[in-house]
C-alpha cells in the first residue's frame, strides 16, 4: 500500500464515525476500527522489506518553491512508531467502544481519535521537515480536542488548554529550529538533512537549532520543566490517556529526538542538555508518582519518569544506549497502555480511582488483577518480563556514563529512580488489589465484559512474550529501528534475560528491595512528603498565562482602544514618518517634466475643491452640512476625471456619489445630527498638527511623482497595445476590468456580495433583538413636514425608471469599446430602483420586488464564475476570454465577447449588493403594516378599475 | 465663432459655479445650500457639454446625461431628509 494512502487513511476515515453514529455506536466504532485496520495491514505489507533494512519512499512535489514537498519515507524507526500508533490505536478503538457511556458523543470521539492518529502517522512517515511540522501542530490541535472531550468538566477544559499552550509553544520553537536546520543542510528533506552531520554540528547555529528543536521535543514529551501538562491531561477519558500517553503523543518528542539523533547527537551540548533533562525528569516523575493517590495521576507521573528514562538514554549519545532507548519505547508502550486501560477498568467498575478508597479488588476482579500484576511487575523491572530487559540495559549504560567527571551521579540517581519506580509499581498492586476486601466502594466492582479487558490482555501477552523470547518477538523490530537511528553498524547487544552477574543486576536488585522497603514505609514517607513545601505547577502556569494575557491586553488596548482617531493618528504618523525617512535617506532625481500652465477651468475647479474641503473641516460638527459639502467635492472630482480624460471614472464617480449620499442619509437618520466635542483641546491640536503634516507630505509626494517620469516603464503601454488585439475591446479600462485583471474583478464582486450580505445579517440580528421595539417606538428627533410620498416625485420617478434602465442597458453594452461597463450600469440600475423606494415608499417598492437581492448577487457571481470556467472546456486557464464577430443580415458587423457575459455577472452582483445594503438600512426605519397614504397605488393591470366598472 | 462663444460661456458658467459655491458654504438655511448644490450640478452639466463642444468630442455626453438623470436623486435625498428625517419610508 502506498505510504500516501497509509497516512491519508485515518484522515479519510475520520469522516465515517461522525456520519455513521446515526446508525449506532457499533457502526461508528467499527468504521473507525476498519479504517485503522486497513492502514495497519497496509503498513504490515511493507514489514518484510523494512525489516530487511530497505527504506520505502513516496514523493510528490507540492510547493517546491517553498521547499515543501509531500515526501514520505518508511524506515525501521518510522515502522516501529507507525506499528505502535496503528496497533495500539486499534486496541484503543475496541476498548473505547465499551468504555464510553451512552451520554458520550461517540462519533465525535472516534473522529477526533482518527484525526489524531492520522497526524501521528504523518509525523513518523514524513520525509519533509516542513510537512512534519504541519503534522506536529495537527497532533497538538487534535489532542486538544481529545483531552477536552468531556467538555462539561472544567478540569478537562483546563487540561486541554494547558496541553495546547505548552505543546503549541514548543511547536513554535521547533519550527524555528527546523528552519535553521533546513537552512544549514540546504534542503528540507529529512533524508538529505541526515547526511549532513558534520556541516550541522560545525555550524555556529547548531546550538540555537538544537535548543529550539529540543524545546519542541521536551514540551511534547513532558520533560522537566514542562512535565506538568501531562498529569493535568488525565482529565481526558481513559482511552485517550492510554493512547496519548503510552504510545503516541508523548512519544512524538522521543521520536523526533531519535530521528534527529544521527545529526544532533554526540556533542557535549547534546549530552548535557538531553541526558540531564532526562535524568531529572526520570527521578522527579518517579518520586512524585509514589505519592499520588489518583491511579491515573500515578500512571501519568510514571509515564513522565519513563519518558525521562528514554530521553536520558538518547542523550547519552552512545549507540548501545540508543538501542536500549528504542527497546524501552516498545516495552513502555505495551505495559503502560495495559496499565492505563486497567486503571480505566477499575474506575469504570468501582467509580473511583482514588487508591485510598480501593483495596482488596483481587477477589472481585481476578482478570483485571492478573493483567495489572503482570504489567506492573514489568514496569517495576521484574524478570522475566520485558520491562526488566530494557531497564537492565538502561542501568548498564548509566553505570558506564560519567557526568561532569563524576562516576556516581548518573548511576546513583538512576538507581534512585528505579527504586521509586519499583515502589509505585508495587503500590499499584498492593494498595488496589491486595489487602482486605472493603465494603465502602462507591459501587461494588466486578470484572468488566470482555470488550474492556481483551485489549489490555493482549498487550500483557506481548509483555510476557517479549520478556521470554525477546530476540524472536521484538528482535527484528528493534534492530531495524535501531539501524535507522544509529546507522548501519549496529553495536553488539543481546536482548536476553541473563547477562551474568553484572553491576546492572546488583542495581536491579537494589531497586526491587528498595521498592519493597519504600512501599512498607509508605505511610511515613507520605506524611513526610506532604509536609514538604512544593511548588504547584498549575498555579505557576496560570499566573504565567494570566501575566502574558495582561501584557498582551496592555499592548493591544493601548493601540486598539476603539477610538478611530487614535487608529488614524497611529497609522498616519507611521506612514508619514516612514515616507519622511525614505525622503531623507533616498535620493530624489531632478524633475523631468515641466509644470503645465493652469487653465481657468481647472483653477475654478481647484477653488471649489479647496473651499469645499475647508468648509467641511470647519462645519464637520453639523453632519448634514458636512454631507452637503462633500457633495461639492464629489462633483468637482467627477468633473476633473472628465477633464483629465478619464470618462469611465467620471461615470463611476457620479453614480457612486449618489449611492453614498443615500446610504449616509439613511444611517444619519438614527444618529445624532451633530458631532459632540469629545476630546480636549490639546488632543485636537495634536490631531490637527498630524493631519496638516500628513496632508503636506502626501501633497509633496504627489507633486514629486507627477513632475518626474516613472523610474520603471509603466504597464499601461502594454494594456494600450493589447486591449483590442487580445481583449477585443477599445475601452482599455473596461478590458482591464473584465479581461486583463478579470480575476481581481471576480474577487471584488465576491467581496462586494459578502459585504452586502454581512450588512443584511447584521440588520437581521439587530431587528431580531429588543432594539426592534425601541426602533418602532422611536420618536423622530426633528419635526416632520410635507407628504410622505409627494405626487410629483412619485410620477417623476416612475417615468424615469424605464429611461434610467434603458441608459443602464446602453452603458452596459457599449462598455467594451466606449466608456461604460457592467459596474457603472449596475450602479445606474440600482439608483433607478432606489428612486422608487424613496418616492413610493418601502412597502410599495418591496411588494413589487420579485427577485430577492441575495439571489441577484448570487446569480451575478455564478454567471461570472461560469464564464470563467467556460475557458476550461477549451483547455485554457480560468477566465481566458474569447471574442469574435458575427455578420447579421441587414445589420452592422456584431461583436460578441465572453467578457460581456462576465460583465453581466459584475452588473448583477453590483445591483444586488447595492440594493441589499440600502434595503437593509432602510428596514431599520420601516414599520411593517404601516399604511402608505399617498403612494399612487394604481395597479398597472387596472383590474380594480375594470371591476369597479363591472359593479357600476 | 464657436471658439469665442464657448470661451464666453465657460466664463459665465465658471462664475456661476463660484457663486453657487459661495451659497453652499455660507447660506443661512440648509435648504438654500442644497439648492445651491443642485444648481452646481446643473452648471457642471453645462460645463461638460461645453467642453465637449470645444474639444469636438462626444465622449463627455454620457457623463453629462448621467448627472442630469441621477444628480437630482441626491438633492431629493437631502430634502427628504430635512422634511421627513427618513428618506425611504
Image (cartoon, coloured by chain):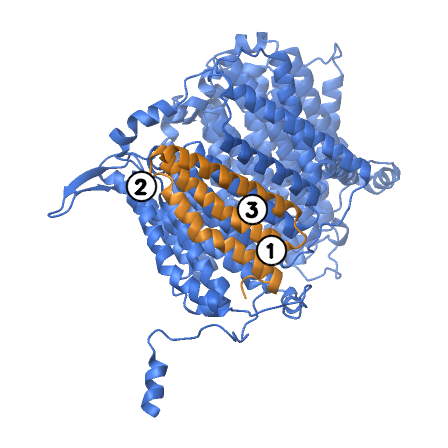
Chain colours: A blue, B orange
Residue A75 visible in the current orientation: yes
Residue extending farthest front: B1
Between A137 and A808, the one nearer to me in the picture: A808
Residue extending farthest bottom: A952
Q: Which residue is depicted at the point 44% across and 48% down?
A: B67
Judge left or right: residue A252 versus residue A228: left
Callout 1: few (<14), some (14-19), or many (20+) C-alpha neighbours within 10 Å? some
Find residue A410 and report its horizontal and vertical position in percent: 72, 19
Q: As displayed, is residue A421 above or below residue A918?
A: above
Read off the residue under disc 1: A667
Which element is circle 1 on?
A: helix
Which of the marked residues, 1 or 2, is nearer the chain's N terminus?
1
Q: As displayed, is residue A154 above or below residue A950?
A: above
Q: Which label was assigned to residue A631?
A: 3
Q: Which residue is depicted at the point 27% across and 37% down?
A: A881
Read off the residue under disc 2: A868
Which element is circle 3 on?
A: helix
Where the N terminus of chain A falls, by quadrant?
Answer: top left
- In this rendering, the label closer to the viewer, 3 or 1: 3
Amino acid at each position: 500500500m502506498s505510504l500516501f494512502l497509509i497516512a491519508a487513511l485515518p484522515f479519510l476515515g475520520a469522516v465515517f464515525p461522525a456520519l455513521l453514529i446515526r446508525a449506532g455506536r457499533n457502526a461508528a466504532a467499527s468504521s473507525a476500527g476498519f479504517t485503522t485496520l486497513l492502514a495497519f495491514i497496509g503498513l504490515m505489507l511493507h514489514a518484510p522489506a523494512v525489516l530487511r533494512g530497505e527504506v520505502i519512499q513516496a514523493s510528490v512535489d507540492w510547493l517546491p518553491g517553498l521547499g515543501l514537498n509531500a515526501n514520505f519515507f518508511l524506515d525501521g524507526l518510522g515502522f516501529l512508531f507507525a506499528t505502535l500508533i496503528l496497533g495500539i490505536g486499534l486496541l484503543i478503538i475496541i476498548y473505547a467502544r465499551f468504555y464510553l457511556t451512552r451520554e458520550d458523543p461517540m462519533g465525535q470521539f472516534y473522529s477526533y481519535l482518527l484525526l489524531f492518529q492520522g497526524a501521528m502517522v504523518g509525523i513518523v512517515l514524513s520525509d519533509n521537515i516542513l510537512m512534519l511540522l504541519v503534522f506536529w501542530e495537527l497532533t497538538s490541535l487534535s489532542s486538544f480536542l481529545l483531552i477536552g472531550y468531556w467538555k462539561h468538566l472544567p478540569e478537562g477544559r483546563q487540561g486541554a488548554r494547558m496541553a495546547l499552550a505548552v505543546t503549541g509553544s514548543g511547536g513554535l520553537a521547533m519550527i524555528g529550529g527546523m528552519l535553521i536546520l533546513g537552512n544549514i543542510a540546504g534542503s528540507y528533506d529529512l533524508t538529505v538533512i541526515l547526511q549532513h552531520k558534520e556541516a550541522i554540528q560545525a555550524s555556529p547555529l547548531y546550538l540555537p537549532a538544537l535548543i529550539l528543536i529540543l524545546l519542541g521535543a521536551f514540551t511534547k514529551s513532558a520533560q522537566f520543566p514542562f512535565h506538568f501538562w501531562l498529569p493535568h491531561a488525565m482529565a481526558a477519558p481513559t482511552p485517550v490517556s492510554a493512547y496519548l500517553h503510552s504510545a503516541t503523543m508523548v512519544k512524538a518528542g522521543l521520536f523526533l529526538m531519535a530521528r534527529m539523533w544521527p545529526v544532533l547527537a554526540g556533542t557535549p551540548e547534546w549530552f548535557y542538555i538531553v541526558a540531564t533533562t532526562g535524568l531529572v525528569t526520570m527521578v522527579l516523575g518517579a518520586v512524585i508518582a509514589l505519592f499520588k493517590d489518583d491511579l491515573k495521576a500515578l500512571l501519568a507521573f510514571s509515564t513522565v519518569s519513563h519518558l525521562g528514562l528514554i530521553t536520558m538514554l538518547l542523550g547519552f549519545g552512545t549507540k548501545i544506549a540508543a538501542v536500549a532507548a528504542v527497546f524501552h519505547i516498545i516495552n513502555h508502550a505495551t505495559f503502560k497502555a495495559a496499565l492505563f486501560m486497567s486503571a480505566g477498568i477499575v474506575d469504570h467498575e468501582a467509580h473511583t480511582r482514588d487508591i485510598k478508597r480501593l483495596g482488596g479488588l483481587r477477589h472481585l476482579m481476578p482478570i483485571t488483577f492478573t493483567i495489572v500484576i503482570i504489567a506492573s511487575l514489568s514496569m517495576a523491572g521484574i524478570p522475566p518480563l520485558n520491562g526488566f530487559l530494557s531497564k537492565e540495559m538502561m542501568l548498564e549504560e548509566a553505570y558506564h556514563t560519567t557526568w561532569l567527571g563524576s562516576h556516581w551521579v548518573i548511576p546513583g540517581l538512576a538507581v534512585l529512580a528505579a527504586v521509586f519506580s519499583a515502589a509505585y509499581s508495587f503500590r499499584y498492586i498492593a494498595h488496589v488489589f491486595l489487602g482486605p476486601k472493603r465494603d465502602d466502594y462507591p459501587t461494588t466492582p466486578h470484572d468488566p465484559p470482555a470488550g474492556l479487558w481483551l485489549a489490555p490482555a493482549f498487550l500483557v501477552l506481548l509483555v510476557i512474550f517479549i520478556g521470554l523470547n525477546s530476540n524472536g518477538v521484538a528482535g527484528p523490530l528493534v534492530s531495524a529501528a535501531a539501524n535507522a537511528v544509529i546507522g548501519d553498524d549496529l553495536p553488539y547487544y543481546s536482548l536476553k534475560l541473563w547477562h551474568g552477574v553484572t553491576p546492572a543486576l546488583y542495581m536491579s536488585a537494589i531497586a526491587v528491595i528498595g521498592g519493597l522497603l519504600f512501599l512498607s514505609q509508605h505511610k511515613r514517607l507520605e506524611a513526610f512528603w506532604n509536609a514538604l513545601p512544593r511548588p504547584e505547577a498549575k498555579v505557576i502556569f496560570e499566573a504565567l498565562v494570566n501575566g502574558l494575557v495582561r501584557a498582551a491586553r496592555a499592548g493591544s488596548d493601548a493601540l486598539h482602544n476603539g477610538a478611530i482617531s487614535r487608529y488614524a493618528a497611529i497609522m498616519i504618523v507611521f506612514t508619514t514618518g516612514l515616507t519622511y525617512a525614505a525622503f531623507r535617506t533616498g535620493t530624489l532625481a531632478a524633475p523631468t517634466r515641466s509644470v503645465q500652465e493652469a487653465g481657468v477651468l481647472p483653477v475654478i475647479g481647484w477653488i471649489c475643491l479647496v473651499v469645499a474641503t475647508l468648509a467641511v473641516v470647519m462645519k464637520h460638527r453639523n453632519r448634514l452640512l458636512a454631507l452637503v459639502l462633500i457633495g461639492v467635492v464629489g462633483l468637482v472630482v467627477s468633473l476633473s476625471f472628465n477633464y483629465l480624460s478619464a470618462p469611465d471614472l467620471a461615470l463611476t464617480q457620479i453614480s457612486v456619489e449618489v449611492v453614498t449620499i443615500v446610504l449616509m442619509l439613511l444611517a444619519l437618520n438614527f444618529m445624532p445630527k451633530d458631532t459632540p466635542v469629545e476630546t480636549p483641546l490639546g488632543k485636537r491640536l495634536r490631531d490637527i498638527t498630524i493631519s496638516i503634516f500628513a496632508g503636506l507630505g502626501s501633497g509633496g509626494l504627489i507633486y514629486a511623482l507627477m513632475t518626474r517620469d516613472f523610474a520603471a516603464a509603466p504597464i499601461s503601454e502594454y494594456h494600450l497595445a493589447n486591449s483590442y488585439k487580445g481583449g477585443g475591446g477599445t475601452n482599455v479600462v473596461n478590458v482591464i476590468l473584465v479581461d486583463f485583471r478579470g480575476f481581481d474583478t471576480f474577487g471584488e464582486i465576491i467581496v462586494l456580495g459578502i459585504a452586502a450580505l454581512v450588512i443584511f445579517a447584521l440588520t437581521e440580528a439587530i431587528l431580531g433583538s429588543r432594539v426592534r421595539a425601541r426602533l418602532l417606538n422611536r420618536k423622530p428627533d426633528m419635526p416632520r413636514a410635507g407628504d410622505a410620498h409627494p405626487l410629483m416625485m412619485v410620477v417623476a420617478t416612475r417615468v424615469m425608471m424605464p429611461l434610467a434602465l434603458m441608459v443602464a442597458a446602453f452603458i452596459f453594452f457599449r462598455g467594451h469599446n466606449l466608456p461604460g461597463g457592467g459596474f457603472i450600469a449596475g450602479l445606474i440600475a440600482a439608483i433607478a430602483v432606489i428612486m422608487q423606494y424613496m418616492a413610493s415608499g418601502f412597502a410599495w417598492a418591496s411588494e413589487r420586488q420579485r427577485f430577492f437581492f441575495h439571489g441577484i448577487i448570487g446569480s451575478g457571481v455564478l454567471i461570472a464564475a461560469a464564464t470563467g470556467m467556460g475557458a476550461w472546456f477549451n483547455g485554457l486557464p480560468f477566465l481566458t476570454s474569447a471574442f469574435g464577430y458575427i455578420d447579421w443580415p441587414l445589420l452592422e458587423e456584431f461583436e460578441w465577447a465572453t467578457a460581456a457575459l462576465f460583465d453581466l455577472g459584475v452588473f448583477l452582483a453590483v445591483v444586488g449588493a447595492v440594493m441589499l445594503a440600502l434595503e437593509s438600512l432602510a428596514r431599520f426605519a420601516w414599520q411593517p403594516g404601516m399604511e402608505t397614504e399617498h403612494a399612487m397605488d394604481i395597479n398597472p393591470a387596472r383590474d380594480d378599475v375594470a371591476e369597479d366598472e363591472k359593479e357600476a | 465663432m464657436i471658439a469665442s462663444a464657448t470661451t464666453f460661456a465657460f466664463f459665465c458658467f465658471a462664475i456661476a459655479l463660484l457663486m453657487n459655491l459661495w451659497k453652499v458654504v455660507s447660506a443661512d438655511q440648509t435648504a438654500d445650500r442644497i439648492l445651491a448644490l443642485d444648481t452646481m450640478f446643473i452648471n457642471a452639466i453645462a460645463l461638460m457639454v461645453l467642453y465637449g463642444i470645444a474639444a469636438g468630442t462626444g465622449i463627455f455626453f454620457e457623463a453629462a446625461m448621467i448627472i442630469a438623470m441621477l444628480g437630482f436623486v441626491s438633492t431629493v435625498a437631502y430634502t427628504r431628509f430635512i422634511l421627513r428625517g427618513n428618506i425611504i419610508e
